[in-house]
Image (tube, rainbow, N blue to C red):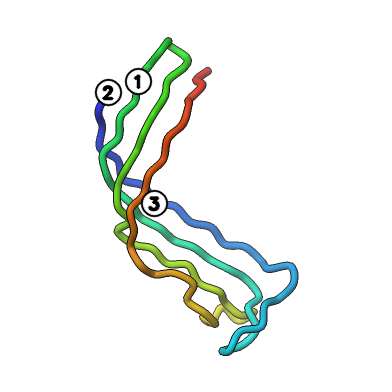
Amino acid sequence: MVQLYARLDGFYGNIQNNVNTTNGVADNVSMTTAMAGPGYQYNFTKHISVYVYTGYTIFNDIRLRDAGGDDVKNVNDSNTFYSRAGIKFKI
């Protein structure tokens, strides 16, 4: 089955041992990513399938932040190619 997908993903986490940067001390890290593209899924049985997704990140923002939430370092903000493949087990 061929399909189109769009995905919004992200995380926010504390850094256990703070990181010193040229702009200050990083206390946490955050990431926000939006991506879209085509995908393919093949169903072997009702409960097992394999999938392949490819696409491009429309928005990509990975930053180190201080305890006040201010940006200390921009780790990555460039849009890139994205691919993902795997096996799905459905209940």
Quarter of the figure with the N terminus: top left
Specify the label residue 19 is tagged with. none
Kindly identify the residue that appears in the image at 48 percent across and 25 percent down. 88
Tell me residue 79's x, y (percent).
33, 62
Residue that protrudes farthest toward the bottom in the picture: 23
Q: Secondary structure at mark 3?
A: strand
Kindly identify the residue that appears in the image at 67 percent across and 77 percent down. 19
Tell me residue 46's x, y (percent).
43, 11
Which of the two residues, 72 or 86, is positioned nearer the viewer here?
86
Q: Secondary structure at mark 2?
A: loop
Q: Secondary structure at mark 1?
A: strand
- Mark 3: which amino acid? Leu
Q: Quick check: 39 left or right of 28?
A: left
> How crowded is the residue under tag 2: few (<14 C-alpha within 10 Å), some, or many (20+)?
few
Kindly identify the residue that appears in the image at 54 percent across and 82 percent down. 72
Q: Is residue 31 above or below residue 7?
A: below
Residue tagged 2: 1
Marks 1/3: CA–CA distance = 24 Å
Specify the label residue 42 is tagged with. 1
- Mark 1: which amino acid? Tyr
Q: Earlier in the sequence, mark 1 or mark 3?
A: 3
Specify the label residue 8 is tagged with. 3
**In front: label 1 or label 3:** 1
